[in-house]
Amino acid sequence: MDYKHLIATTYDANYAGLRDGSGDREHYAALAAERGGPVLELGCGTGRVLLPIAQRGLPCVGVDPSPEMLEVLRAKEPPANLEVVLGRMETLDLERRDFALAIAAFRAFQHLMSVDDQREALTRLRAHLREDGWLALDVFEPDLARMARDDPETPGEPFEALGRRIRRNFWVRRDQLSQTMEITFRYVDDASDEELGIETLGLRWIYRFELEHLLWRAGFEPFRWSSAYDGRPYDRSGDIVVVARRR
């Protein structure tokens, strides 16, 4: 069996346990119902968030830089009202410029590894929204003590995928100057301890007021800040969940 691209091929099985119960899918689905379509998702991945929205009948476009992630999404036979596009948010250039809502769920915005890329992505996102369009995204709340150190290899919780019980161990290297982190995943057969593959991804952490500054500079007015997906006021107790309107 080919174990390349394990992040994509095991994504749904792994994150079902990690994200179910967070309320993020319900949060974005409620925003889509409130705004109507069309809906644009940046970093749509395997369709965990966008596919349920499209299945409710709203016209949707999902953009992702990973061909492997989009292959998993296409294998789910999404409805005709969901268009899938290979691309990056910092170079976004779609023909359609009438989106009522753009979303970047589950920290997709943090895969932009520089302030310049983050600012460019927000500027391009704004250009794809209609005049009263909204942008909704979430990032994790940085823990200052944790961001100041690296994490050694840590065992993950086993999950079922690819006909095996797999454990995804991980370790993290952080750079405080650039606010970036490199996360390395080691996929291991939980029964035999056989190594199946190693994959790496990068994230840039961002602080609440840094994000607010970027949004304003890009032409957005943030008007909802929460620490969870149930709408509770922002209090630094969880994630940073924001909704902004085009101005």
Image: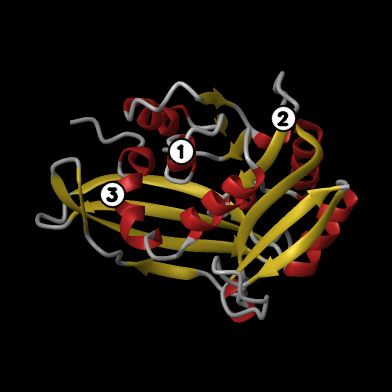
Which residue is painted at 81% across and 53% down in the image? 215
Q: Nearer the viewer, mark 1 or mark 3?
A: 1
Q: Mark 1 points at which residue?
A: 56
SS class, disc 1: loop
Image vertical order of residue 55 relative to residue 16, above or below: above
SS class, disc 3: helix
Q: Mark 2 points at which residue?
A: 91
Distance between mark 2 and mark 1 Cα atoms: 29 Å
What's the amino acid at mark 2? Thr
**Residue toward you, 140 or 95:** 95
Image vertical order of residue 173 relative to residue 78, above or below: below
- Answer whether residue 192 is visible to the viewer in this image: yes
**Residue toward you, 69 or 185:** 69
Image vertical order of residue 7 relative to residue 71, above or below: below
In the rendered structure, the answer to whether residue 172 lies left or right of residue 7 reads right
**Residue toward you, 143 or 149:** 143
Q: Mark 3 points at which residue?
A: 13
